[in-house]
Amino acid sequence: MQQPRDCDAALARRKDELFDVKITTTTIMMIPEVVKVDPERKHFILNDWHLSGISRKLTDRNLCYYIPFNYGEAERLVAMRDIDVTFQPVAAMDSHGFFNFSTSNSTASYTTKKAKIVVVEVNKSVPVCLGGNSEGIHISDVDFIVESAANPPLDTLPELPVTDVDIKIANLVMKEMCDGACIQLGIGAMPNTVGALIAQSDLKDLGVHTEMLVDSFVDMYAAGKITGKRKQLDVGKIVYAFAMGTEKLYNFLDHNPVCASYPVSYCNNPFIIAQQDNFVAINNCLEVDLYGQVASEALTGRQISGTGGQLDYIYGAFRSRNGKPIIALSSTAKNTDGTLSSRITPGLSPGTIVSVPRAVASYIITEYGTFNLKAKTTWQRAEGLINIAHPDFRDQLIKEAEKLKIWRRTNQI
């Protein structure tokens, strides 16, 4: 997300004066200067609520620590922490004395209310993102103002390559959609592919209530697919907590009244999500085991991302009238030696973290089909998941299921 680059650089310059300074960020898009100047971590300790590719590499080097949490609980968790100083990126102050949080409403209102000292770093090049609510802070609540020297543009996400497998999975996801559905998309090539297919489809009057707003929502809106007319809450509004994408997205957001920026505890509240009929939550993961446990954030002890809002949306979408909580994944992963391994596994390896418990998980989609775990026995789950695993791994998965005593052959295999 946005980073206070000038404040970061100024803090790094004071390295020799400071010790054991604990810094908390969310999904950083560049290596902080405080990390560069202190590789031995004598002065600064970096923590991240949700790992990006940058913070993942820093974590691998023991230069960053992950904070496990459900994103929708952010307001309460921030309240539990001590915050001496917050460096908050903002847009330029408006004529009423407000600084807009731009693309990162998310937790900004929580941290600025909790901190003893509030420093805003003004970047005149970022879009002004309308609310919603809590999308900005008044100058009367600010202690110090730092004017950015460079006013750098927001970081952009690279376009991810789309594979034939992504397209097959996205087409299966599309079969679960209906007119008037309210949608949430996670990050990645496959959710973006779903967005592209929606833009080309005959679907109409879709609504948006999502954690992360990405470019594909702009394409769907431009194609006339998103109106929000059938939403039960925030009718006509594209609701989101933060946005990351390209200049196309940022230009779309700037002063756009159709977009409503909210704190994440609203966007990710399962009981808010559940009030939207026909809610379709579309997320991906790393692995699913034969019990139905979904691992989306860490594999064999390596933290890759975070729980984020996946559990919030899976839980909330199931409680929506006709809602569909979807986890979509390719059936295989390519290993470093070029061989393939199954992403549907007998059980999760030690250090592989459950993001969605088996009792909460519902629709699982691979390129080989769709299976709904809800109300299924352990052997039905094993059979259904093996049916949508890669054919090359099905026999071995059956053998493992037999060992686990969760196998009962029917005529479906």
Image: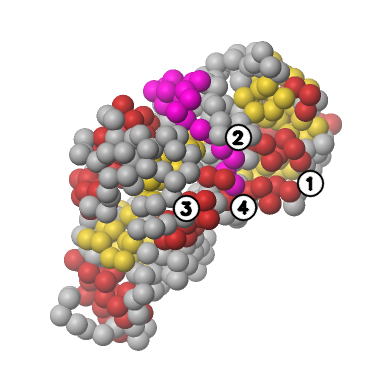
Q: Is residue 303 magenta?
A: no
Disc sitting over residue 133 in the figure: 2
Q: Earlier in the sequence, mark 4 or mark 1?
A: 4
Q: Secondary structure at mark 3?
A: loop
Q: Secondary structure at mark 2?
A: loop
Assess whether mark 4 and mark 3 are in contact (beta carbons under 8 angstroms). Answer: no
Q: Is residue 139 left or right of residue 174?
A: right
Can see residue 300?
no
Disc sitting over residue 73 in the figure: 4
* Observer-nearest of 266 and 79: 266
- Closer mark to the observer between disc 3 and disc 1: 3
Disc sitting over residue 275 in the figure: 3
* Observer-nearest of 392 and 361: 361
Disc sitting over residue 82 in the figure: 1
Location of residue 9 with respect to 374 vertically, above or below: above
* Amino acid on which disc 2 is placed: Asn
Q: Earlier in the sequence, mark 3 or mark 2?
A: 2
* Amino acid on which disc 4 is placed: Glu
The residue segment tinted magenta is 247-265
- Return the x and y of residue 391 as percentages of the image width and height: 19, 66
Assess whether mark 1 and mark 4 are in contact (beta carbons under 8 angstroms). Answer: no
- Return the x and y of residue 175 as percentages of the image width and height: 22, 52
- Closer mark to the observer between disc 4 and disc 1: 4
Q: Earlier in the sequence, mark 3 or mark 1?
A: 1
* Quadrant assignment, res 114: top right
Can see residue 158?
yes
Disc sitting over residue 319 in the figure: none
- Closer mark to the observer between disc 3 and disc 2: 3
- Return the x and y of residue 343 as percentages of the image width and height: 33, 61
* Residue that lies at the very extreme toward the left in this rendered image: 411
* Observer-nearest of 330 and 134: 134
